[in-house]
Amino acid sequence: MYDNVIVPFDGTLPGRAALAPAADLAWRCGARIVIVNNTEVTDGASRAALKSRAMSLSSADVDFWVDTNLELGEALVEAARFRTNPIICIPARGGRTALRRRFALTPLTEQVLRGSSVPVLVVGPEADTSRGLPMTSLVATLDGSPESEGVLRLAGEWARELKLGLTLIGVVSSSNEGSFEGETEYLRAHTEAVRSEVPEADFELVRASDPVSGIVAFMDGRPDAVLFMSTHGRGGAGKGLIGGVALGVIGECKRAVVLHRARS
């Protein structure tokens, strides 16, 4: 599925947020971890010390990609361009400030989402990484838009390669007492299409006050699941790097999120 898992690491405690999930994913795929750093670790002693720390934290062998000429996010994107079958794994921590309580993308996340043409595994500020990347099932969100449906191929590939079940979910308003027959049929049709390659595919229509709280609550009940989302849904792919629902979910979800970049 992947040959290289690209992840930033500078040796610090905050810098290890994405390392354990990246190591778990690499182990599952038989991939190599590629540590990207944009600081001066080019001398042999510094590189050996950083590599030793990364190996002790990830329990895996690692390669290095050092580029002091680029911002870290740009260096991650550049590394992915020169590696076969890559995925980028990044932390999205520290996005809130005292003046701005709403979660916002970090500069690293912005740089990666702006430049990457490969999938991005995002470890949000609330994500539990104490067990690495536990994964016994996969969840993909749909909202009825072609942009959101772009994630189906990616989620289906993971389900086939890792031999895991896949649940497609949609969120409808809990204040509406309707039957939601159209939304249910939409999810059922896409699930049936996915089942041709992923037999253990299912769907669930979630009732919630809003899409973010509905998705986050659904994932709270699945501690060993990974979530798949498109960067944009009904709002389209021209209003910024990421849509409001995806941004809100990353900021609150306790699970890792795999983002598929919706193209305009």
Image (tube, rainbow, N blue to C red):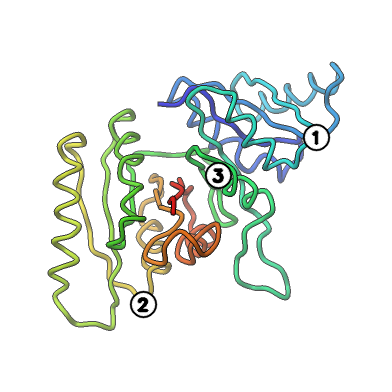
Of tags 1 and 2, which is closer to the observer? 1
Q: Earlier in the sequence, mark 1 or mark 2?
A: 1
Pointer 1 residue: 69
Which residue type carries mark 3? Thr
Q: Tell me the number on the disc at residue 209.
A: 2
Q: CA distance from mark 3 to mark 1?
A: 30 Å
- Mark 2 secondary-structure assignment: loop
Of tags 3 and 1, which is closer to the observer? 1
Q: Position of residue 150 (x, y in %)?
A: 34, 48
Query: In the image, what residue occupies the spot 17% across and 37% down?
Result: 199
Report whether 32 appears left or right of 228.
right
Query: In the image, what residue occupies the spot 53% across and 52% down?
Result: 127
Which residue type carries mark 1? Asn
**Category of crowding for the residue at label 1, using alpha-carbon neighbours closer than 10 angstroms: few (below 14), some (14–19), many (at least 20):** few
Q: Nearer the viewer, residue 263 or 75?
A: 263
Report whether 212 appears left or right of 112.
left
Query: In the image, what residue occupies the spot 72% across and 75% down?
Result: 99
- Mark 3 secondary-structure assignment: loop
**Quadrant in the picture for residue 71:** top right
Which residue type carries mark 2? Ser
Pointer 3 residue: 129
User: What quarter of the picture does the N terminus occupy?
Assistant: top left
**Quadrant in the picture for residue 76:** top right
